[in-house]
Amino acid sequence: MSVSTPSQSQSYHHGELKPALLTAAAELLGEGGAQAISLREVARRAGVSHNAPYRHFPDRDSLLAALAAEGFVELAGRMAGTAEGLAALGQCYVHFALEQPGRFALMFGATLDKARYPELQQAAQALHQRLAQAVHAAAPERDPLVATLAAWSLVHGLAHLLQDRQLGERMGAGLSAEELSARVTALFVEGL
Amino acid sequence: MSVSTPSQSQSYHHGELKPALLTAAAELLGEGGAQAISLREVARRAGVSHNAPYRHFPDRDSLLAALAAEGFVELAGRMAGTAEGLAALGQCYVHFALEQPGRFALMFGATLDKARYPELQQAAQALHQRLAQAVHAAAPERDPLVATLAAWSLVHGLAHLLQDRQLGERMGAGLSAEELSARVTALFVEGL
DNA sequence: GCATAATGTTGACGTCGCCAACATACGAGG
DNA sequence: CCTCGTATGTTGGCGACGTCAACATTATGC
C-alpha cells in the first residue's frame, strides 16, 4: 500500500507522490477525521521522508484544501447524475455526508480559510447552481435565491444533525437516518 | 487582564483560575477559532504556568467541552426568553451562530467526541425540546418528530451556510444575513 | 553531455499535549 | 495555635508535530 509498483519502491524519486499523499490523507480522514491528518504520518504511509510532502503542498492546510476540493468534485458529480427531483437531490446530499463524514466536515467546516482557496468557493458554486436549477423546476414562482438557500440549508443542516447524533437516540426512534431524511425533504418539497 | 485583583497577582494560588481559564479560552476562540486554543497559551493569558490548567481540566478536549457547554447554556437561555413564534426562534438561533461563530462551530462541530461529554447531548436536548414545543404550536397536525427535525435542520444549515459565506458574495446580493435568514424562515413556516 | 530545475532527504527549531516530581497554600482536628 | 493532609500551582521533561534551511539525487531542456 505504501508504493504502487515494486519497481519504483527503491528509487529515490517516488514518481506518483502527490496522488499517493492524497490517498494516504484520505485514509486518515476516514479513520480519525481531519484532526488525525498529520503531514508526517501521511509521508510515513506514502513511504517517503517527513518533508517530502512540502514539494507538493506548501503547508498542511493546502493538503486539507485539496482533500476538500476532491470532495466537492465528487459530490457535484453525483448530483449532476441524479434524477431531476428536488427530493432526490437532497437525499444524494445527505447520503454523501453520512457516507463520508470526515470529508463533509472538511468541506464545510470552519477549519479551512476559504479565502485562501478560491477553488473551494468555486466548487461550492457548482453545487449551488445545480440546486437552484432543481428548485426552479420544482417551484418556479418562488424567489429562486431565497428558495434555493432554504433548500440547501435544510439538507445541509439535516446532514449535519444526522451525523452528529446530536438529537439523541430517542429522537430517531425506529427511523433510520435515510428514512428521516426522506421524510424531512418530502415535507419541505410539499411545503413549496 | 491577566489577574482580576492586584492583591492576588503575586500569590502562589490564583484563586479564580478555572473561570479565568475559561475566559482566556473564550477570547482565543473568538480570535482564531477552536484551533487557536492551546492549553499553554490559555495558561499564559491567565498568568499561570503551562501545567496549571490540568488541575481543572483533565485534557484539552475537556476545556473545549466546557466552552461548548457554556454556549449551549447561553443559547438555551436566549431561546427560552424568545417570543413563541417559530420564526423568532429561528432568527435567534441564526443570530447566535453569526455572533459567535467559533463557539457555534465548537458546539456542533465534529471536533468533540460527544460520547465522552454527555452534558453536551443533554444540553442539546434542551434546545430540541424548545424547538419541538414551538413547532407543535405552529403546526399541531404535523408529525412532531419530522417537523421538528426539519425546522432544526433548516436553521442549523442556514446558520452554517451564512457564516461560511460558502454561497459566494453574489448569492446574498444586496441582502444582509439577517434579512436572508428572515425570508428563509418565513418561507418555511408558511410551508408548514 | 551538461547545466538547471524538480524532487526527495537530513537535521534542526519552536510549540504543543501530557506525564512525573516537587513546592506552596488552605482548612480541618487536635 | 499548631499540624498535617489535600488542593492547587510550578518545574522539567518526553515524544510528536509543522515548518525552515541545507543538501542529495534524479529528470529535463539546450
Image: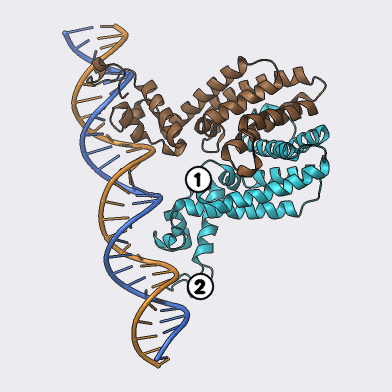
Chain colours: A brown, B cyan, C blue, D orange
Judged by depth in the image, the label closer to the viewer, 2 or 1, is: 1
| Quadrant location of the C terminus of chain B in the rendered image | top right
Determine whether B38 is above or below A65 in the image: below
Badge 2 amino acid: Pro
Q: Is residue B84 above or below residue A79?
A: below
How far across and how far down the image is residue A105, in percent?
A: 54, 34
SS under mark 1? loop
Few, some or many C-alpha atoms within 10 Å of disc 1 (few <14, some 14-19, many ≥20)?
some
Q: Residue at x 66, y 47 (%)?
A: B99
Res A176 quadrant in image: top right
Of residues A166 and B82, the one drawn nearer to the viewer in this rendering: A166
**Are tags 2 and 1 found on a single chain?**
yes
Front residue of this view, candidates B104 and A98: A98
Q: Which residue is mark 2?
A: B6
Tell me the CA gap for discs 2 and 1.
39 Å
Q: Chain of mark 1?
A: B
- Whether residue B22 is situated above or below residue A147 in the rendered picture: below
Judged left or right of residue A99, residue A20 is left
- The x and y percentages for residue B60 are 45, 52
Query: Residue sitting at 56 percent across and 46 percent down?
Result: B106
Q: Position of residue B142 (x, y in %)?
A: 79, 37
On the question of residue A125 being in view, the answer is: no
Q: Are marks 2 and 1 in contact (CB under 8 Å)?
A: no
Residue receiving disc 1: B113
